[in-house]
Amino acid sequence: MTLMTEHPTISGGGPDSFEELLDILDELNLRDGFKAEIYRGNILVSPWSKGYYHRVMEQVCEQLRPHLPSDHSLTTGPFLFVFPGDECAYAPDIHVAHKRVFETDSNRLDGEGLSFVAELTSPSTRNDDLTDKVTVYGRAGVPVYLLLDMQEEQATVFWTPSAKGYVSHCTKPFGEKLHIPEPFDCTLDTTGFEAPRSS
């Protein structure tokens, strides 16, 4: 098994299956300030977000909430969504899913039940957010994936999921407005998504 952190490190052994990786994830006793996800057969441990990410996530949620599809829930809670076909398990920063997705006593939620995900990149996860997650979320049929590239200060929305990922996308620099497609059909104002400037 490979444990990847801000600077990837290898930890010996190797589970035989995705289910075994999920079991290991359940048993991990992470230090405060870290979360774990499964990427391409590896467990990735990454630090929690920077403080100002909370402001950005709140702004996204406030703008999306009035446009939620019926019986859907929007949250930033630490939930693990599994994608068995791709052997991945992600904990998106922001997610929307039908309320029935949460009616389970399992901590492994159905990734195909998502209607929206948003990821705020960090140096340790940015490459996966820009590549693998685009493919996995698209193949799972998630209608909208919003990628907030906190390092480049730009927002990309992906829509029209397909077997190869997403067919359509649009990128705007922070500070501009971005259309969020169906089932939301609203405008996201990215003003103020930038990092605080030191004086």
Image (tube, rainbow, N blue to C red):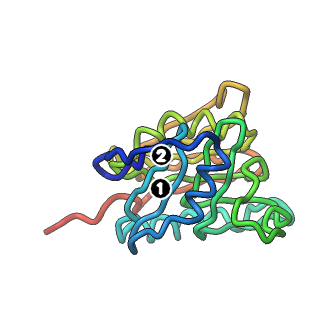
Image quadrant in which the C terminus is located: bottom left
Who is closer to the viewer here, 96 or 186?
Answer: 96
Q: Secondary structure at mark 2?
A: strand
Residue under the point 67% across and 45% down: 144
Q: Which residue is mark 2?
A: 155
**Three-letter amino acid code of the residue under disc 2:** Ala
Query: Residue 167 bears which disc, if any?
Result: none
Q: Residues within 10 Å of mark 1 (few under 14, many from 20)?
A: many
Mark 1 vs mark 2, CA separation in Å: 8 Å
Q: Nearest the camera: 196 or 147?
A: 147
Query: According to the image, label 1 marks what residue?
Result: 190
Residue 110 in the image: state x and y as whole percent: 76, 53
Q: Measuring 55% from the left and 35% from the top, which residue is drawn there?
A: 170
| Residue 178 pos. (x, y %) | 55, 47
For label 2, count other residues whose C-alpha is less than 10 Å away and answer few (under 14), some (14-19) or many (20+): many
72 or 6, which lies in front? 6
Whether pointer 1 and pointer 2 mark residues with C-beta atoms closer than 8 Å, the reply is yes
| Residue 37 point in image, percent of width and height | 53, 53
Which sits earlier in the primary sequence, circle 1 or circle 2? 2
Question: Which residue appears at 42% of the width and 56% of the height?
Answer: 45
Which of label 1 and label 2 is nearer to you? 2
Which quadrant of the view contains residue 73?
Answer: bottom right
x 37%, y 68%: residue: 52
Image: 120 above or below 64 = above
Residue 130 lies left or right of residue 66; in this view the side is left
Q: Nearer the viewer, residue 96 or 102?
A: 102
